[in-house]
Image (cartoon, rainbow, N blue to C red):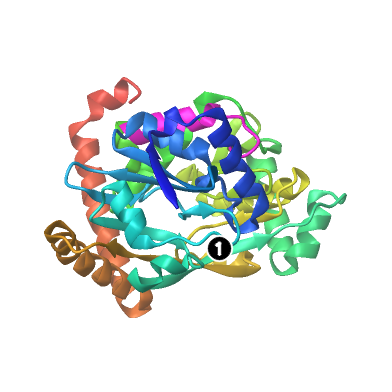
Amino acid sequence: MDITIHRPDELSTSLRRAWHGVMDESPEYANPFLSPEFAVGVGRYRGGARVAVLHENGEAVGFLPYERNSLGVGRAIGLGLSDLQALVHRPGVAWDAQELLRACGLSVFEFDHLIDEQKPFGKYVTGTFASPVIDLKPGDSDYAQWLRGAYPGLAKTTLKKERRLGRDLGEMRFEFDERDPRVLRQLMRWKSAQYRRTGRMDRFARPWIVALVDHLFQVREEHFTGVLSVVYAGDRPVAAHFGPRSRTVFACWFTAYDPELRYYSPGLLMHLRMAEAAGRHGVTLMDWGRGDKQYKDWLKTRELRVAEGFATRPHPVAAAHRLLRRPVRGLRNTVLAHPTLREPADRLLKTVGTLRTSGLSDSSGRAGGRGR
């Protein structure tokens, strides 16, 4: 097994074609987060992005996108943003985790959404988690018929809220693939406000993430297309979602809505409209990603499993990294796994978020006047 290391944007056309071929050959690798386009996008804004290419008999048979810092600490590419990670390889390819880490110059490789079937990483897994998905089938019925057939328990209330939204604010319409970048900016503003209200880290306060989403919005390729979906009432955006799709998999990523309209359940309206439209556009799997949300439990048809952990080589840096990271992850996972702990933690985060948002409102009113 030969392993070569490349910057994502330096991959040759033949290597990208081979990577796409592996995605097509194995359904578990069809997710757009496993595409070279996602790796190239992250590599534009993260200097340590690399791709390890595995070769057998001169042929490229596997691809591991990752990020590496100056100390040799590695992580799955886009860790914290990507909802699926893997060494993407052809069926039957045998590889060794230690050999791979040595070739990449890594003492540790951290992952948090690794495909569960990556057996050579198995002994380094510290936990596995459910990742809800919806299996979709193309149909020729209209939305209301689809909704009544797919989710009979939600159909009556959902259609009623859509009608009420139309009466109150203007006729409701849905755009599965909106190309107006102004709506993407509105989505980011809504999402930032939501992060602050709930005490979470505001991803869109990081310029590189904003730049990455802007870039991916422009990508229109067979194995990766940035899709912006929007629910409108009249000309007013009510809810929006941005996420990538491949030919067959649509990855749910950033969803937000106008908080003034929360009583219409705009997030749920968005997810249901997206699912129906995605099926009509050839998608067979809608991947929600890891995480406990009530709407995921309502809408999922089954669950995949993803893993988190640290693949390591004997090295002082690897030992130090595990000592720093594992307790933080363990505490977080303990809280998330127990509702009696999760609910008080959520309340605390929301209280912090309210205080933070109030402070920002008091101190940044003039900036708000400039539309920031």
Q: Quick check: 263 above or below 181?
A: below
| 339 left or right of 166 in image | left
Q: Quick check: 59 above or below 43?
A: below
| Percent position of residue 118, x then y | 47, 64
Hey, which quadrant is residue 178 in on the image?
Answer: top right
Extent of the magenta region: 208-225
| Percent position of residue 97, x then y | 37, 61
Magenta segment includes 84: no
Badge 1: residue crowd in 10 Å (few <14, some 14–19, many ≥20):
few
Which residue bears the numbered disc 1? 295
Q: Nearer the viewer, residue 269 or 332?
A: 332
Q: Secondary structure at mark 1?
A: helix
Residue drawn at the location 43% of the way across and 59% of the way down: 113
Residue drawn at the location 71% of the way across and 54% of the way down: 284
Magenta segment includes 216: yes
Q: Main secondary structure of the magenta part?
A: helix
| Percent position of residue 251, x then y | 56, 49
Q: Residue furthest front?
A: 57
- Which of the image's four quarters has the C terminus? top left
| 254 left or right of 370 in image | right
| Percent position of residue 95, x then y | 45, 60
